[in-house]
Image: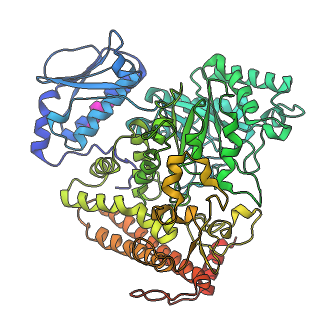
Amino acid sequence: DDGYRLWLKYDLLKNANVRAQYQPFTLYIAHAATDPVTSTAAKELQTGLQGLLGKSIRLQSTASTAPGGISLELTTTPQPNLGTEGYSITTQNTRVKISANTPSGLLYGAFALLRKIQTATPLSKIPETSVPRVQLRMLNHWDNTNGSIERGYAGASLWKWYELPETVDPRYRDYARANASIGINAVVLNNVNASARFMSREYLLKVKAIADVFKPYGIKVYLSVNFAAPRILGKLKNSDPLEPAVRQWWVDKASEIYGIMPDFGGFLVKANSEGEPGPQDFGRTHADGANMLAEALAPFKGIVIWRAFVYKADPKGDRFKAAYEEFKSLDGTFLPNVVVQVKNGPIDFQPREPFSPLFGAMPKTPLAMEFQITQEYLGFSTNLVYLAPLFKECLDSDTYVKGAGSTVAKVIDGSLHQYPISVMAGVANTGSDRNWCGHLMSQSNWYAFGRLAWDHQLSSSAIADEWIKMTLTQDAGAVKTILAMMERSREVYVDFTTPLGLHHIMGQGIHFGPEPWLERSARPDWTSIYYHRADSIGLGFDRGINGSNALGLYHPEAIKQWSQVDACPLPYLLWFHHVPWGKKLNTGRSLWDELCTRYYTGSTAVGTMQREWAGLKGKMDAEIHADVLGRLGAQQREALWWRDACVLYFQQYSKMPIPAPFTPPSRTLEEIKELVRIYQFR
Ligand code: BDP
């Protein structure tokens, strides 16, 4: 098994008794609706059930109420409880009915039924009503025109721009199908560091060819735009959003786009961030820029997703505060079809961050969540890190903006502030590798993202359990072992890289490796010393009132949980405090001893994962087993690298010994620095 089939394997269910319980309703699959999405749903059910149950099932494109089958039925009068994309599955004697207000709802219902059967769910648990909590469940691809992927670790881009539109790779369809199976309904095809090329007619026709493949799967296409496109492409003298010629250019462009693709979703924009052009180039605000585009898209019901990932090179400031400082005051000034997309944390997709303070600060502006599924700062595609616990940790955080229980999830699903649009986006981890994600276990992160975007109340273990059973094995013992491994994997990664709230100490050119000694870069906030602030006294970034006071950006109740060094939960300690090396923590150990303990136990835990995985031989496909085992070996090597680099580097400041029972690294800091250098040679 090369992993290509993801979680949609549909192999024969091994247990004959389990198969037998589903037999009574597998005579036929019926649907009267003739639209492409419903047809997709019916065909998927047929393929899936035939595979899982090992029998042929009749497909009929007329309604049926006969016993013994499954029918897909659009409601005759809209059912408010099902919304636009929800579904309900009911069973009556030997008939299963999937109903929904729209074809997309039927498609999600079909995949839900398949998932239940794939995971051998007892008949009594088949009935279900489910409605997505977030409207746009979106993948952001950081794919470039030349086939490379920014921060992609699974091969080249799936989109073959030079072949399109004449040649349409069948893989686009397999991709769309995988997304639909987990409820993803929106895809941004290209990098946020966007080429203006995508706004050309030449490229729009290529984009349309992909959009046409996605449509029967209920997925809309969006594009990242280069704010300077009117100048670059349209040969205007600038791209000032208040310039009439520029505004007209976008108006014309929007009608051209919708002429080609009437279902086009809208724009994603990275502006005035990391060197990208934007409205500030002309003394205008983010709102001026976003509103100009929003006005152009509004007649077609398109939306603008404007990113809040901005930070200026300010040697005196704290990057933590940058996005808040630029966006907070703009709340209420955006047009209704603008959404501001905020990364989960204030810095940049670190293994652990507190939630971004913006989530508690913009009641009048729909905020989208941006998670990173691709493991830029979580070990690329050599590390087993299950990200659902990271996603959940942020979603479940309490902003307290409207009293206790004002979670980030309720902000972004729109329920707290009644946002008209809700979006959860994930930066994709897919590529041309045969198994899509490089690391087979990283497929679970794509899967979990989709499932959580649909329903953020699902637990990370319930999602992992489904995924393991569909993807790897249904052997009860093996499922348990893998589940436990996945559940602790993120904490293990945090422990051997950035424990106790350390952040941004990775290699400048190799984000999977350590470089805590990085002290010079093009910008101060690209170094490591800017963040860890190690000195002879202690470690960590004081963000309290005597420091940068980034803490002050949160609601008072949220501040309370982090502001006292003695009460601050250890995972966030060094995010907010500069703590003396000898300070006793609530674990009974000093900061230094605790730090060492985390690095040592974290790296040891990778060895444990390796042994546990080795013990699963024979419980799953041999090729998959061997591939993951190899990657765990690489992860072990990288974990030791992080451990040795960080304890030796910080020891220069603490001047304290590596505590018992741990053995000091057998290599020197210089030797490790050399290793980092090797990885950074061209
Ligand atoms: C950073 C990535 C960079 C992206 C940027 C972004 O290193 O490649 O362009 O985020 O999100 O984490 O715009």
- Say if residue 443 shows up in the picture: no
* Residue 535 higher or lower than 170, as above or below: below
Q: Is residue 47 magenta?
A: yes
* Residue drawn at x 64%, y 65% as measured from the top left: 531
Q: Which one is in front, 543 or 320? A: 543
User: At which x and y percent is residue 47?
Assistant: 29, 34
Residue 151, quarter of picture: bottom right
Image location (x, y in percent) of residue 524: 74, 64
Q: Is residue 652 left or right of residue 280?
A: left
Residue at the (71%, 51%) spot, across then down: 311
Drawn side of residue 605 relative to residue 71, left or right: right
Magenta stretch?
44-48
User: Residue at image x 39%, y 21%?
Assistant: 83
Colouring mode (rainbow / by chain / secondary structure / one colour):
rainbow
Which residue is the extreme one toward the top? 77
Quarter of the rendering occupied by the N terminus: bottom left
Measured along the vertical axis of the image, is residue 259 above or below residue 474? above
Q: Is residue 533 visible?
A: yes
